[in-house]
Amino acid sequence: IPLAAEPHTVRCSPDGRTVAVSHPQGGVELVDREFGDITASFQKAGSSLGIAWHPGGRWLAIPSRDGMVFVWDTRGGPSSERNWIAHNGAVKQTAWHPDGRLLVSESADGEIALWDARLGEKLVEYAAQSVGDLTFSPDGRRLGLFRQGDQVSLLEVDDGGAIMRYSVGHEGH
C-alpha cells in the first residue's frame, strides 16, 4: 500500500477492507486494502499513536498528544467525529470493549480511563504504573493493563464500568 509518509501505527478494520494508518508527524489515513487508494484522512488529532477500530468497523478511536480522544465516524468523513478531553497529558492508546459501548484510554503518565463512548463520559479512572497494551478479553470482562516484573495485572470490568484489580504471575523472580 503506497502511503504519503512513514506509518507509526497500522490497524486493519474488522471486515478487513480498510486499513487505518497513523503517522508520527500527525494525521490518520484510511486506505482501501484492495486498491491501495487513500479514501479519507483525519488531521485534527496531530500525532496519533494507539488508534483502535470499533468492533462494528464504523468508528475509529484516535488518541492525541494534547489529551484529547477523537471518535471518528469513518463513513461520514473527517467532520463526523466526537471528541473530549480525556487526560491532562498525551493519550498513548485506546481500546474498544468488545460490545462497542465502552472505550478505554491510557495517558502517558499512566492513568487509565474507561468511557461511555457514545457520551464521552468518564465512568472509571484508574492509576496504573507500567502500562503495556490495552486489550480486553473476548468476553469483555477483563482488561489487560500492566506488567511489573513477572506480574501481569488485569482489571475486571462489569456492565456499569466498575473496575477491580487483580494480578497473576510469579512473585520473587
Image (cartoon, rainbow, N blue to C red):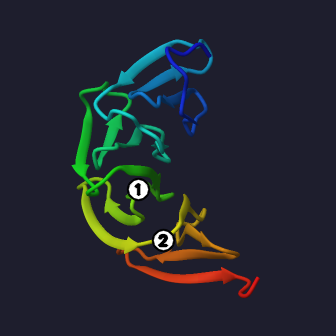
Q: How crowded is mark 2: few (under 14 residues within 10 Å), some or many (20 or more)?
A: some
Residue reaching furthest to the bottom? 172
Residue 89: % across, % down? 30, 54
From the viewer's perspective, is residue 33 above or below residue 58?
A: above
The C terminus - image quarter: bottom right
Q: Which residue is drawn at 28% across and 57% down?
A: 87
Viewer-proximal residue, 50 or 120? 50
Q: In this view, does 19 lie to the left or right of 125?
A: right
Q: What residue type is labelled 1?
A: Ala
Say what secondary structure mark 2 lies in: loop
Residue 18: % across, % down? 54, 27
From the viewer's perspective, is residue 92 above or below residue 173?
A: above
Say what secondary structure mark 1 lies in: loop
Q: Mark 2 points at which residue?
A: 129
Q: Which residue is drawn at 28% across and 30% down?
A: 44
Q: Is residue 75 left or right of residue 13?
A: left
Report how far apart the C-alphas of labels 2 and 1 lie in the structure. Answer: 10 Å
Q: Is residue 80 left or right of residue 160?
A: left
Q: Which amino acid does label 2 sit on?
A: Gln
Marks 2 & 1, CB-CB < 8 Å contact: no
Disc nearer the start of the sequence (2/1): 1
Residue 112: % across, % down? 40, 65
Q: Name the residue under label 1.
A: 108
Residue 100: % across, % down? 43, 54
